[in-house]
Image: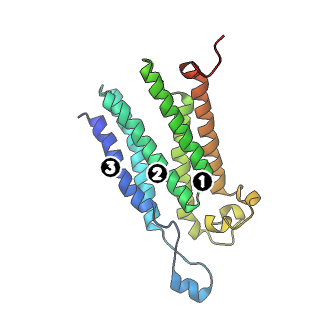
Amino acid sequence: MTTANKITLTRIAMIPFFLYFASQSMYIFDKDTTAHTMIPTFVFPTATVVALVLFCVASFTDFLDGYVARKYNQVTDFGKFVDPLADKLLVSSALILFAEQGAMAGWMVCVILARELIITSLRVVAANKGRVLAATWTGKVKTCVQIGGIIVIYLYYIAFPSIGLGDPMWLMPPQYIQQLPESIQMFSVVSVVGWVITLVTIYSGWDYLRKNWDIIKDGAVKQK
């Protein structure tokens, strides 16, 4: 097995550990202090920090395995299959947990996952026709935005307890933001990041379909 493939498999092996720490509560309250002062007192979210570190390391291996494969001529069919699979597993895991924890709207995550399934299906159809879909710049931007957005959301959750509850609404912790009207919630940092990720993902999917519609147009339009 090539070094590049080993790096990719390492990324997949890290996902269960990431899931464990990422599934822990992002905000931990000191119950005793909170009960006496009636003011929420936060405990440093160690699990969230570990989850962020694991996510960053795993994301870096995505760049590393591609670099090694190209530099040392280690591009293989196995790598072409496993590398994008590892990326989707990592990002999808984070986004699904965000939906469960209230960091992103569930419909946003559904739209993002739908895009990934549609483009994956398109690649399968293209492969059956002997055609390989090259990665577009929009796809690369989408991946960078998703990874960057996830990191920003984690940093927001980690940093906020040290900011204090007297800050402007856009710096409020998400569990308080969720109690505000939806028209106000959409201007929070976490919501803005979620919208950016979703819109860029939608555009990327549309760009893929637009450029490769000829692959699936048979049967989609009436024959003259």
The mark nearer the N terminus, 1 or 2, is 2
Q: Circle 1 — which element?
A: helix
Q: Position of residue 80 (x, y in %)?
A: 37, 30
Label 3 element class: helix
Task: Decide: is 64 above or below 168.
Answer: above
In this picture, is 57 found above or below 80? below
Is residue 145 something that shows in the picture?
A: no
Q: Residues within 10 Å of mark 3 (few under 14, many from 20)?
A: few
Q: Nearer the viewer, mark 1 or mark 3?
A: 1
- Mark nearer the N terminus (1 vs 3): 3
Count neighbours of disc 2 (C-alpha within 10 A) and say few if under 14, some if 14 to 19, many if 20 or more.
some
Q: Is residue 52 left or right of residue 137?
A: left
Could you tell me which residue is drawn at 47 percent across and 25 percent down? 125
Real-space CA distance between mark 3 and mark 2, rounded to the nearest whole angstrom:
13 Å
Image-based side of 213 in relation to 9, left or right:
right
The local crowd at label 1, few if under 14, some if 14 to 19, many if 20 or more residues have their Cα within 10 Å, is some
Residue at the spot x=76%, y=57% of the render? Answer: 183
Q: What coloring was used for the rendering?
A: rainbow
Q: Of the residues shown, which amino acid type is indicated by label 3?
A: Ala
Above or below for 142 versus 191: above
Nearest to the eye among marks 1 and 2: give it: 1
Q: Which mark is residue 106?
A: 1
Identify whether 148 is placed above or below 1.
below
Q: Secondary structure at mark 2?
A: helix
Q: Quadrant of the N terminus?
A: top left
Badge 3 vs badge 2, beta-carbon distance below 8 Å: no
Quarter holding the C terminus? top right
Return the residue at label 3.
13
Amino acid type assigned to the residue bearing label 1 in the image: Gly
The x and y percentages for residue 55 are: 43, 51
